[in-house]
């Protein structure tokens, strides 16, 4: 017996995971074209082939959908960082991290602009602020986990992994903002140099009471 719907019968229901995937893909395109403030849920839903109700049945609202779009990129970056951290030489891992981050910041300015707009909106909207906080906490936790693994393989740290991750996280966001404002002066080489300098300081053995490195 065929499982195909009879002529004139109801269309097969799209699986929930496919609905979510199509909404995320559509949202990424619409947000990239119009920014956060200029994007409407109606347009995102229509681009995905659904009604706005599908958005609300999968996400808490525009802020939640936007956070999910940015979160997917962050998850991919965290996975790449974790993969790089499996390298045999922690120092080489840090060099690669600085180089990859500089390339991402200067090569994917769309992501930087959207993140900056979302953070600015979060300053006066509580639901957006909560979404930003969750996303950034996840980013910092992933970085701290990778740093802890590198420390376990002999990389000296001037501070604990969580503090180190917070410093690197803030520096990366700041460099992204500076590149957006002045891309000629804050180019990939400048970003990589700044990151390498700070990472070198953060991974130097802390001094002992005598003032000498541990």
Image (spheres, helix red, strand yellow):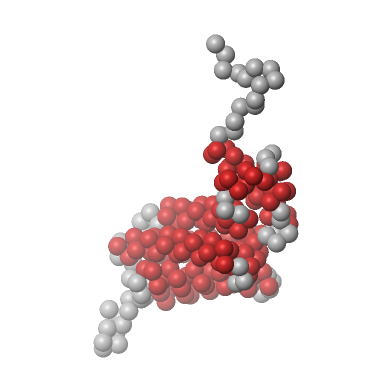
Q: Could one spot residue 29 in this view of the protein?
A: no
Relative depth, front residue between 191 and 178: 178
Residue at (30% x, 65% y) in the render: 154
Q: Position of residue 185 (x, y in %)?
A: 66, 74
Q: Could one spot residue 146 in this view of the protein?
A: yes
Q: Quadrant of the C terminus?
A: bottom left
Residue at (61% x, 27% y) in the render: 12
Relative depth, front residue between 36 and 40: 40
Q: Position of residue 153 (x, y in %)?
A: 30, 61
Q: Position of residue 67 (x, y in %)?
A: 57, 57
Relative depth, front residue between 170 and 128: 128
Instruction: State which quadrant residue 35 falls in.
Output: bottom right
Q: In this rendering, is residue 6 above or below 154? A: above
Query: Viewed as shown, does residue 83 lie left or right of 132?
Result: left
Residue at (46% x, 73% y) in the render: 167
Marks counted in the figure total 0
Residue at (67% x, 46% y) in the render: 52
Q: Position of residue 64 (x, y in %)?
A: 57, 56
């Amino acid at each position: 017996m065929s499982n195909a719907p009879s002529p004139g019968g109801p269309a097969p229901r799209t699986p929930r995971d496919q609905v979510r995937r199509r909404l995320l893909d559509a949202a990424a395109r619409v947000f990239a074209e119009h920014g956060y403030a200029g994007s409407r849920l109606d347009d995102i839903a229509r681009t995905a082939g659904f009604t706005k109700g599908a958005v609300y049945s999968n996400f808490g609202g525009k802020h939640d959908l936007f956070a999910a779009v940015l979160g997917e990129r962050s998850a991919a970056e965290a996975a790449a960082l974790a993969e790089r951290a499996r390298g045999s030489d922690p120092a080489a891992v840090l060099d690669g991290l600085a180089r990859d981050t500089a390339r991402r910041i200067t090569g994917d300015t769309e992501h930087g602009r959207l993140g900056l707009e979302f953070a600015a909106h979060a300053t006066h909207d509580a639901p957006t602020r909560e979404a930003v906080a969750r996303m950034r906490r996840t980013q910092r936790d992933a970085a701290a986990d990778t740093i802890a693994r590198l420390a376990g393989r002999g990389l000296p740290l001037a501070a604990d992994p969580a503090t180190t991750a917070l410093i690197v996280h803030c520096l990366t966001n700041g460099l992204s903002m500076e590149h957006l404002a002045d891309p000629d002066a804050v180019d990939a080489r400048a970003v990589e140099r700044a990151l390498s300098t700070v990472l070198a300081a953060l991974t130097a053995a802390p001094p002992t009471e005598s003032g000498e490195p541990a």
